[in-house]
Image (spheres, coloured by chain):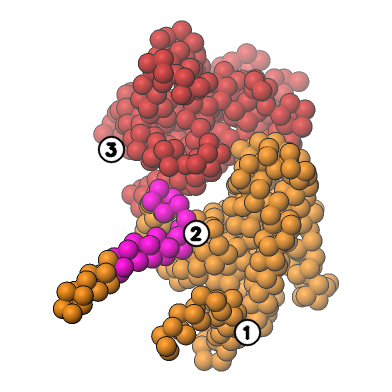
Chain colours: A orange, B red
């Protein structure tokens, strides 16, 4: 009887369990700085940053099928918002400002390119990063006369908490967007855009809006990351790794569910932050191989492995159980 | 005026290389439907191999493509016939295939670039071949390698164009690009054709790399910026249009030299981008695009 209760707990109260698990995670992160040094704290902050980037990338690109290569552009805008405004505005206001500037830019890019075929959008988003990097470079060199900017280092524990708050907001917001009418509209665009249009969905508005919303979180994450970089120049702030890594993480984790990209971000965020430069080079080779292998053999990522194993193992267990039952029958 | 003219000439000479690079990408996307984001890495491989073949084995850079070409062709052929063909067989729709092929190409980019970094480091390897200057009209000087590399690029471009339009294999390629299923029914071995096109794209990238190492420098990090240029050129010329991408390459070459010479070199990419924006709003399929 007791065994039954446990299985029922896992099936009917799944949501409750999930919330409990999330609360435990949050408690873990909140208490983390109490018994760990600043280095580990900053590693955890970086992991949370990648969670935000990977989850918000997945929200738009994976559901609609429009591959965006622009996260680095919005992230870099966040970093530069912090660098330029740190002396004038309080930190929380800059987070909002960085998010809003990214939102506006994504809106602009989306309005121009999202009505075209997906491949043009991909190419444009790819160029956007280099475009903004060069513009900032030019403006900084001619107007401000600098190559880079220094950032005031803020308390790392505080940064961790802000990043945690941002990650929670991001995940919750995206969770609710996915369940809303907007989320359904996005999914139908990913399934068949023409059919979605015939069903009365204004596909352009949905695409542009969700793309811009996903950019808010990336921009805000950039603002919160900026202080721990200490020094930035355009090629650091707009480094394409910030575009590529979240995508790789999302693909590796699996894009069907929100926890797929988050899981990928935890694994690779940790590795990317802690491996030394020399080791990182070898790691990137392994990373590339892993990516290809995952795309070919596990289209649903590591998370997709679970149901696959479950069905396979389930079959084996059922067969075993049948076998043992048969034996029992034979014995009696 | 004379300065502008000379910039335009240098731009045309550079544009030939861009065109060659973009032709390969255009062939890969137009026929195989793979937006090969690792294209620039093949350019890098061509450049690095050329440098080391001439540096350690004393092979003339002009002969190097005879070794590098087949090597990269084989690599491209293998990639298409194993990786991308498998992905295509599993993909539920053509759009899904384009997405997953793009992501797989990402993986390939990482593998090639970091393997090259492990093998060759990140040194800048300047060109020392054919650097004699040649007097040109209006009292300006061009270096010999600029002219030679342009001539090779144009000759190759024309050769590929003639091959695609005149030969039997070229017709099979065009048929496959238009409608793979029907081409297959007409007796075209489409899998071989796709492999061949991807290989040819990689080969063209490799030779472009040879020419780049001859006239500028070789470095393991040049792949990425070349991918950006090739993507812009291909979009400008119309995705999948091979002659269009060559002409667009020359336009981009001229623009890049004019912007660098008269304004500021960091602004070249923003200017490309502006041109592309305006063009896509006016003609969404590119200059020579069909639809």
Extreme residue in the front direction = A332
Tag 3's secondary structure?
A: helix
The CA span between labels 1 and 2 is 30 Å
Q: Are marks 1 and 3 in contact (CB under 8 Å)?
A: no
Q: Are marks 1 and 3 on the same chain?
A: no
Range shown magenta = A295-318
Q: Chain of mark 2?
A: A
**Where in the figure is residue B9, as x and y percent of width and height?**
63, 20
Q: In terms of depth relative to the viewer, which is nearer, B2 or A102?
A: A102
Q: Are marks 2 and 3 in contact (CB under 8 Å)?
A: no
- Residue position marked by numbered label 2 in the rendering: A254
The CA span between labels 1 and 3 is 54 Å
Q: Are marks 1 and 2 on the same chain?
A: yes
Q: Residues within 10 Å of mark 3 (few under 14, many from 20)?
A: few
The residue sitting at 58% across, 64% down in the picture is A258
Q: Is residue B182 visible?
A: yes
The residue sitting at 71% across, 24% down in the picture is B3
Q: Quadrant of the C terminus of chain A?
A: bottom left
- Asked if the stretch drawn in magenta spans residue B221, the answer is no
- Residue position marked by numbered label 3 in the rendering: B56
Please report whichever mark, 1 or 2, sits nearer to the chain's N-terminal start.
1
Q: Chain of mark 1?
A: A
- Residue position marked by numbered label 1 in the rendering: A157
Q: Chain of mark 3?
A: B
- Give the number of the mark in front: 1 or 3: 1
């Amino acid at each position: 009887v007791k065994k039954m209760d446990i299985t029922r707990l896992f099936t009917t109260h799944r949501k409750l369990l999930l919330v409990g698990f999330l609360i435990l995670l949050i408690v873990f992160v909140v208490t983390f700085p109490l018994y760990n040094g600043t280095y580990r704290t900053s590693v955890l902050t970086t992991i949370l940053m990648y969670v935000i980037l990977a989850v918000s990338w997945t929200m738009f690109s994976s559901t609609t099928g429009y591959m965006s290569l622009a996260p680095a552009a919005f992230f870099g805008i966040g970093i530069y918002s912090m660098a330029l405004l740190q002396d004038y505005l309080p930190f929380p206001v800059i987070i909002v400002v960085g998010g809003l500037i990214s939102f506006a830019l994504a809106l602009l890019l989306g309005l121009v390119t999202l009505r075209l075929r997906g491949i043009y959008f991909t190419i444009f988003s790819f160029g956007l990063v280099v475009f903004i990097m060069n513009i900032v470079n030019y403006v900084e060199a001619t107007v401000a006369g600098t190559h880079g900017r220094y950032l005031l280092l803020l308390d790392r524990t505080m940064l961790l908490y802000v990043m945690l708050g941002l990650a929670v907001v991001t995940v919750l917001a995206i969770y609710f967007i996915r369940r809303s009418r907007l989320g359904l509209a996005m999914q139908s665009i990913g399934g068949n855009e023409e059919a979605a249009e015939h069903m009365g969905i204004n596909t352009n508005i949905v695409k542009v809006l969700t793309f811009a919303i996903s950019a808010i979180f990336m921009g805000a994450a950039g603002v919160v990351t900026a202080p721990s970089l200490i020094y930035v120049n355009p090629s650091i702030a707009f480094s394409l790794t910030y575009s590529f890594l979240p995508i790789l993480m999302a693909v590796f984790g699996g894009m069907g569910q929100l926890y797929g990209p988050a899981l990928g971000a935890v694994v690779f965020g940790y590795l990317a932050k802690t491996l030394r430069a020399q080791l990182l080079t070898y790691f990137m080779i392994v990373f590339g191989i892993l990516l290809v292998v995952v795309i070919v053999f596990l289209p649903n990522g590591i998370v997709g492995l679970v149901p696959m194993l479950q069905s396979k193992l389930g079959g084996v267990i059922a067969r075993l159980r049948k076998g043992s039952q048969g034996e029992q029958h034979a014995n009696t | 005026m004379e300065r502008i003219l000379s910039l335009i000439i240098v731009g045309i000479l550079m544009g030939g290389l861009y065109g060659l690079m973009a032709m390969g990408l255009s062939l890969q996307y137009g026929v195989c439907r793979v937006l090969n984001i690792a294209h620039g890495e093949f350019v890098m491989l061509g450049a690095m191999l050329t440098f080391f073949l001439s540096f350690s084995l004393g092979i003339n850079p002009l002969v190097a493509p005879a070794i590098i070409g087949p090597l990269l062709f084989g690599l491209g052929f293998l990639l298409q016939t194993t990786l991308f063909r498998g992905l295509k067989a599993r993909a539920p729709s053509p759009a899904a295939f384009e997405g997953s092929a793009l992501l797989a190409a990402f993986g390939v980019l990482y593998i090639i670039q970091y393997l090259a970094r492990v093998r060759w480091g990140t040194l800048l390897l300047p060109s020392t071949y054919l650097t004699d200057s040649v007097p040109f009209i209006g009292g300006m000087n061009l270096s010999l390698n600029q002219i030679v590399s342009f001539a090779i690029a144009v000759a190759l471009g024309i050769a590929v164009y003639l091959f695609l339009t005149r030969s039997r294999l070229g017709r099979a390629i065009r048929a496959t690009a238009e409608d793979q299923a029907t081409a297959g029914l007409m007796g075209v071995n489409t899998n071989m054709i796709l492999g061949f096109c991807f290989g040819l794209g990689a080969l063209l990238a490799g030779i472009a790399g040879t020419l780049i190492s001859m006239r500028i420098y070789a470095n393991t990090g040049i792949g990425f910026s070349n991918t950006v240029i090739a993507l812009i050129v291909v979009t400008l010329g119309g995705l999948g249009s091979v002659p269009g991408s060559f002409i667009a390459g020359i336009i981009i070459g001229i623009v890049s030299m004019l912007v660098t010479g008269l304004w500021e070199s960091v602004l070249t990419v923003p200017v490309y981008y502006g041109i592309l924006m305006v063009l896509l709003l006016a003609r969404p399929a590119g200059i020579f695009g069909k639809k």
